């Protein structure tokens, strides 16, 4: 069964572009919060057109790591280079301008604001000429409804407050937004955690689509099957350190799952879930 | 892709009337309060209150408060407070007075200078708040004291010992910019209206209302501009976002720092504008100008539906909030109630106006 | 010598800033080291604590105003018991002696209000308003009470806040809703007197309505000299600051002290005298 | 493969207790928010010792439904009966006292408070005698660390603020808390969405354990495999209405997945994910 | 079950010193402020400020403010404001004064009556806030005006026209409960200490410090009780939870309504306690008692580390916050600065104290 999963796929992997230069490279990143050591030296890179999965146990430091990548945290130690140039993000806006779009685990949405306003937050399209330049609200509303529909969500209306959306609807807004402002690197922190089956399959298909367009994707998930379905490379974190990186095909789902559990033994479920949870 | 027609007839939506949709806007709730208060005074107050001159009379202090309230509302939507605006009115008044009287500058220099000083101080407030991460409440509170104290010291210097600096009216006499910031606008129109009998006149033939006090025009203009900015520009979107959730906004690429510092500057500018208008109107300034105005401005903004926690509210709401507040403070004088009851009455009216506003909104939107 | 002045009015209050100027002038003239202190608002509890703080420093003389004898008497007694010469000023002439103060310089708020009321009544006033910008401040309430007692006719107190625009609007509202009003009494010149004059002008009744105010401000005095306002009540509060300090300095140096209370007012500034006072008022001396 | 999933299990289903009386029964529940109709008549019941899965697309109304069940929302229409008695919850506290423990989708945690204080929030254990009755902090700390460890999370310390925990750590606190205060009905709203593989298998094992103790479990999930692994009955919601209820074994994973997607067609992933997402 | 030894030597934790751990507590940051302010006055102020009598002198206002601040802090932690405490001081003072002077009740009746009225009003505040869902800011603001106005009207009634009610001291003369609420405690001890020369005396031999003012004892007791409640009882946990996230708390089974209403009552009771103490000390009450105290109380709580948004803070922090505020306000009179500069100075000191507190905490905890 597991073989089936890694081989029998409709996605076209196979060009891991080993030769291609990484878009972004993180070296020996450390991050401390007061006396808490969240990252103790992690290295990672993303190449154009690949989906690099970041896996690991709860609390391993995945979110903290991608937050240093998208300019939210400043690393305590370590270097970030983009296209070979050393980079120092002062704010998430800097990272965005360098072409990094992120779906954060907490989604970074403003509950009191409407879906449309959240969708375009920070990158509002304008119309009209100078003194009366204003947001193109009509276009914004249309785009939002349209992009959400592509992800499988039919909004009641684009002016509903995000705070009143269901968990999965909200997550879809965040994903649709990041994909829409398509960039050079797309970071997805557990994007499918709250999604229904239909929405999940849309997101996985979307990852595949943007990857084919040459975008580098960083995909965090706890679902081994999702990771194997779209991942080209797999890096596993454990307790703030890298456990190792594997190429697609070099690792079985069971091995990967063991790595993700941090090497600790699992509860007595193996059989019932067909090897992977 | 999966797709169903996304039309207005989603079966998961109940029909709702036009009125209901209107009432969902925060500012329109405040109108209910205005109507209530107006009705109350129509019944209890002397009929002169709602003559043209009576309306101008309560609108003048309402407008002065309202200019501050709009600034305060924008800042509150952006998630911060400025407790120093009242003191800013005194301090900017001093700067302006000193420029005009002591230094003898023309308005074309004095006004930009005053505004620049105010904006600078607003920026200082903002930078301290953002650099240190301290709550703006405490930082601007320190400036409340500092600016108030500085006004006193500065006034004594500028006037040679008195707490009042006077002679502004003489100094600006004939300055071409003066009509922009003082006196009444549309004078000729009102004179004409009086001639044809549409406005009451005094015995000597001058109209009882010589025009629209300029602060009312500034107030309306500011409310419109602020509303436009909040609802129709990216900057407005950023203000809501910064106030709604600072981290989320910043993570989504909103330049939160810039937004907040600009808001502190805008608020300070509103304070300076009020200072310029009132100093030119009164012809003098003293150390107690603007006393407690910071709280009144916040009150007006909250009556108008702004959330203290940020991220929600409107400039139009603050506009009506200021009018409610102005009407209630001045209105009692038109009634026969014992004036000792003034504060009880003020508090009661405020409470009833907000409760009513809230009740109406809940009824209409069906919130539980 | 060290002399401490504790007053119930703030340094940014136009009235009290003149007192403070008097204090400073006296300090310069006598060479004494003088401190002027006051609570941030009309707050008797805090004022008694300020007196305690002053007593702790054991100055050579203490000047206090006594708007609330009950609240301040323990602290003042403590000062007297500690052997500090005390002079009371401004308010408290009735209790000054009992508390052990050497003498009192000033004028009772109530008496001043009464004198003003009588004068306005004699000018033909029958219906008056007393505009109070700080209701609950006992010193100001007493002014209104005195005015109302001296005036005799019907008097309504109009409470306002510290905002000239609001005062103007309220006075205008009162005048419009009750055309019988012929007298406006303000409790402060710049904050109430000046806007009241403007309000009377706005309803077109300049000259018909008598406007009077406590204390002085240059602009109001100009109105008085132009005949737009009736008069201002001058307590000559500069003296209330200047005299006690000089007395205490003399007392400390030579043991001299006058034999009785010094009344510093009231002094009604009417049209004939107003013009001369304007300049002095602008300098914060009157 | 799907057969394997439904049959080859270590869990002992099989006594769906058809005869047993439901603990809680919800009839024709409707819930409107202003002009938004979130629930348009949903009926549902939970029997002792069964795990009743509530499934459905994003925005179908699952969370809204269980919130009426746990006293957060008052239903606009419809009746709730417990042990046959009509019930009207005024607050979540009422529902708790009736024996309903809930893990909300938004977890209901206070970010600024410590893990321990969150764990025992509202049900603090006391020690000492009357005038000096106080919280038994030592016992609280120990219990928290212990219960979290059972779920597979090693806390750094019980006084870390919940706001600084990782997404999965936080979710685990909520689950451990609900299980610890073990009640007659345990409601879990997407409890495994942010969990790692190890933690997930622990949670599924826990569901099985409490069910065997006679507790009725309501389990919401978007993961068909998880639902099939522990569920005895499956109710599917769609756009605020019930699509139907199926017994374990009467339905194949593919059928279930189609129902969960609200009958709408899925993206082109079928093959790659082995039938279920 | 998977299991690794959960010991203190988690490799994901850096060692941290005892000092660092201490400084993480919100209240201990405020101590840094106290130390800074003390140092400042040790340098600039007259040496009498830190004699025993000087300390009692600035601790008395600090204690009166502090009692309010502790109430305000608990309410703020619970996520609400009470802007009516200042007016409550005036109103409760009126009730108490009227009971004692006008009705001639003994303290054993007058005090419980006053407290009951205050608690009732606090509950009214709370019920309105919770029933309507309006922000407590606006509701208690209405009560700020209403209670202030009611004090004025009531005083005029009780005293027959004056805004001051006098004669409390005579009325309570000899009441056995009086020493609990007024004057100085431990008098005999201090007299003895003065005799043996440990305390300075005036020239006539009475000790400069006759005892510890009772409000200081109340202040300390209250701070201890409040801290105990917040940190060691379920109710404390509920307060933090209600303020941290109202919905989450309620969903977790915290009786949020009860908690908040009780907090409003506690705050009102603090106001009434201060009223009783100050009225008995002063022997009189007037309509301006407690003016602006609501803001000072909030300031003290914020200096002490309470978050305005609720859910975080401590009673001990408010304790030190009140001491900082009291020291700064009274301290200036011990220095040679001109009174005109008072406000500049007050603002500057506040800002520096909070900045310093903040800086220290960040250094120690290594927050970014
Ligand atoms: N601001 C912070 N302060 C203190 N500790 C933190 C902070 N942020 C994260 N941590 C700690 O760092 C560790 C890593 O957290 P992170 O959110 O990166 O984990 P994760 O790998 O994303 O886990 P999950 O899969 O559960 O989302 C956690 O143990 C968390 O407690
Ligand atoms: N307070 C509210 N106000 C308005 N609409 C709401 C509110 N709460 C929920 N809704 C709407 O009700 C619908 C059902 O929401 P609910 O959270 O119950 O969905 P769900 O089935 O839990 O979805 P998910 O799987 O994504 O969590 C959603 O479309 C949502 O927009
Ligand atoms: Mg994470
Ligand atoms: Mg849900």
Image (spheres, coloured by chain):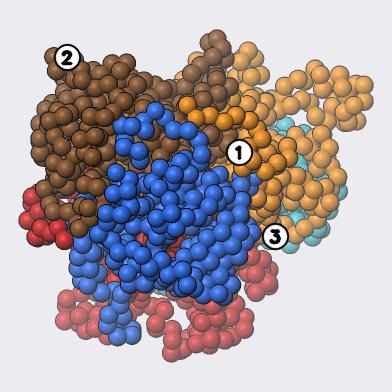
Chain colours: A brown, B orange, C cyan, D blue, E red
Distance between the alpha carbons at the discs numbered 2 and 1: 57 Å
- Image position of B337 (left or right of C52): right
Crowd band around label 1 with a 10 angstrom C-alpha radius: few (<14), some (14–19), many (20+): many
Dot label at residue B341? 3
| Quadrant of the drawing holding the N terminus of chain D | top left
Between marks 3 and 2 in the image, the one whose residue lies nearer the viewer: 2
| Residue B55 seen from this side | yes
Chain of the residue under the numbered disc 1 shown in the image: B
Chain of the residue under the numbered disc 3 shown in the image: B
Observer-nearest residue: C103 or A214?
A214
Residue found at the far right of this picture: B197
- Image position of D74 (left or right of A277): right
Distance between the alpha carbons at the discs numbered 3 and 2: 81 Å
Between marks 2 and 1 in the image, the one whose residue lies nearer the viewer: 2
| Quadrant of the drawing holding the C terminus of chain D | top left
The residue at 47%/22% (across/down) is A124
Would you name the residue on which mark 2 appears? A20
Picture coordinates of residue A261, whole percent (x, y): 17, 47
Picture coordinates of residue E13, whole percent (x, y): 11, 50
Between marks 3 and 1 in the image, the one whose residue lies nearer the viewer: 1
Note whether ligand 2 is within 8 Å of mark 3.
no
Observer-nearest residue: A228 or B111?
A228
Asked which quadrant contains residue B352, the reply is bottom right
Would you name the residue on which mark 1 appears? B318
The residue at 56%/28% (across/down) is B231
Picture coordinates of residue D191, whole percent (x, y): 35, 53
- Image position of B187 (left or right of A274): right
Asked which quadrant contains residue C254, the reply is bottom left
Same chain for marks 3 and 1?
yes
Picture coordinates of residue D19, whole percent (x, y): 47, 72
Crowd band around label 3 with a 10 angstrom C-alpha radius: few (<14), some (14–19), many (20+): some
């Amino acid at each position: 069964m597991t073989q089936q999963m890694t081989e029998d796929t409709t996605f076209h992997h196979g060009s891991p572009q080993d030769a291609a230069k990484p878009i972004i490279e993180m070296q020996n990143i450390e991050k401390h919060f007061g006396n808490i050591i969240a990252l103790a030296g992690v290295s990672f890179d993303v190449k154009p057109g690949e989906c690099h999965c970041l896996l690991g146990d709860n609390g391993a430091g995945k979110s903290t790591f991608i937050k240093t990548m998208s300019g939210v945290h400043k690393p305590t130690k370590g270097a970030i280079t983009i296209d070979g140039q050393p980079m120092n993000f002062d704010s998430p806006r800097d990272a965005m301008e360098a072409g990094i779009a992120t779906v954060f685990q907490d989604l970074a949405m403003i509950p009191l604001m409407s879906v449309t306003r959240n969708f375009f937050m920070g990158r509002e399209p304008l119309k009209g000429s100078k003194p009366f330049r204003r947001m193109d609200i009509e276009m914004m509303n249309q785009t939002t409804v349209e992009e959400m529909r592509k992800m499988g969500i039919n909004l009641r209306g684009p002016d509903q407050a995000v705070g009143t959306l269901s968990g999965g609807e909200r997550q879809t807004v965040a994903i649709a937004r990041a994909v829409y402002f398509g960039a050079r690197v797309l970071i997805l922190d557990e994007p499918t955690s709250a999604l229904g089956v239909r929405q999940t399959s849309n997101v996985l298909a979307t990852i595949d689509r943007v990857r084919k367009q040459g975008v580098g994707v960083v995909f965090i998930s706890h679902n081994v099957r999702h990771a194997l379905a779209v991942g080209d490379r797999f890096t596993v974190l454990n307790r703030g350190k890298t456990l190792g990186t594997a190429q697609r095909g070099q690792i079985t789902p069971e091995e990967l799952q063991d790595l993700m559990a941090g090497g600790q033994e699992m509860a007595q479920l193996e059989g019932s879930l067909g090897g992977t949870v | 892709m999966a797709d169903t027609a996304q039309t207005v007839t989603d079966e998961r939506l109940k029909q709702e009337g036009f009125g209901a949709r209107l009432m969902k806007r925060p500012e329109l709730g405040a109108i209910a309060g205005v109507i209530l208060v107006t009705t109350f005074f129509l019944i209890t107050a002397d009929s002169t209150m709602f003559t043209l001159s009576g309306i101008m009379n309560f609108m003048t202090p309402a407008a002065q408060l309202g200019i501050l309230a709009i600034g305060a509302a924008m800042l509150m939507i952006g998630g911060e407070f400025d407790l120093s605006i009242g003191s800013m009115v005194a301090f900017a008044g001093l700067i302006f007075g000193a420029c005009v009287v002591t230094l003898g500058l023309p308005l074309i220099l004095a006004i930009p200078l005053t505004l620049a000083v105010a904006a600078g101080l607003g920026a200082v407030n903002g930078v301290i708040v953002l650099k240190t991460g301290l709550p703006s409440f405490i930082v601007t509170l320190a400036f409340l004291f500092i600016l108030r104290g500085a006004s006193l010291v500065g006034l004594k210097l500028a006037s040679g010992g008195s707490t009042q600096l006077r002679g502004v009216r003489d100094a600006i006499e004939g300055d071409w910019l003066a009509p922009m910031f003082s006196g009444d606008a549309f004078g000729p129109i009102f004179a004409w209206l009086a001639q044809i009998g549409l406005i009451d006149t005094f015995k000597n033939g001058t109209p009882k209302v010589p025009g629209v006090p300029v602060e009312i025009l500034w107030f309306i203009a500011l409310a419109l501009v602020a509303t436009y900015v909040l609802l129709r520009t990216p900057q407005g979107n950023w203000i809501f976002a910064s106030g709604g959730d600072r981290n989320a906004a910043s993570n989504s690429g909103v330049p939160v720092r810039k937004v907040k510092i600009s808001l502190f500057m805008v608020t300070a500018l509103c304070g300076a504008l009020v200072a310029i208008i009132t100093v030119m109107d009164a012809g003098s300034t003293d150390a107690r100008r603007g006393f407690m105005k910071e709280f009144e401005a916040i009150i007006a903004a909250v009556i108008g539906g702004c959330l203290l926690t940020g991220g929600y509210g409107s400039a139009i709401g603050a506009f009506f909030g200021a009018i409610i507040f102005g009407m209630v403070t001045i209105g009692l004088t038109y009634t026969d109630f014992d004036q000792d009851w003034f504060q009880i009455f003020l508090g009661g009216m405020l409470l009833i106006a907000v409760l009513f506003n809230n009740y109406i909104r809940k009824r209409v939107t069906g919130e539980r | 010598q060290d002399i401490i002045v504790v007053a119930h009015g703030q340094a940014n209050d136009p009235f009290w800033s003149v007192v403070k100027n008097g204090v400073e002038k006296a300090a310069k003239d006598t060479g004494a080291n003088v401190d002027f202190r006051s609570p941030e608002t009309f707050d008797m509890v805090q004022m008694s604590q300020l007196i305690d703080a002053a007593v702790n420093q054991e100055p050579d003389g203490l000047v206090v105003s006594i708007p609330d004898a009950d609240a301040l008497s323990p602290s003042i007694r403590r000062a007297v018991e500690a052997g500090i010469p005390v002079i009371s000023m401004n308010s408290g002439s009735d209790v000054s002696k009992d508390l052990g103060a050497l003498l009192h310089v000033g004028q009772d708020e109530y008496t001043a209000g009464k004198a003003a009321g009588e004068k306005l009544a004699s000018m033909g006033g029958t219906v008056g308003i007393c505009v109070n910008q700080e209701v609950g401040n006992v010193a100001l309430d007493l002014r209104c009470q005195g005015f109302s007692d001296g005036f005799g006719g019907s008097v309504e107190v109009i409470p306002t806040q510290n905002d000239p625009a609001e005062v103007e609007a309220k006075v205008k509202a009162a005048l419009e809703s009750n055309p019988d009003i012929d007298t406006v009494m303000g409790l402060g010149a710049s904050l109430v007197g000046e806007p009241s004059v403007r309000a009377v002008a706005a309803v077109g009744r300049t000259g018909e309505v008598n406007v009077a105010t406590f204390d002085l401000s240059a602009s109001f005095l100009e109105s008085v000299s132009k005949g737009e306002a009736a008069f201002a009540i001058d307590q000559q509060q500069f003296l209330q600051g200047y005299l006690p300090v000089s007395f205490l300095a003399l007392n400390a140096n030579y043991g001299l002290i006058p034999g009785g209370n010094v009344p510093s007012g009231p002094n009604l500034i009417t049209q004939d005298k107003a013009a001369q006072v304007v300049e002095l008022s602008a300098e914060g001396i009157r």
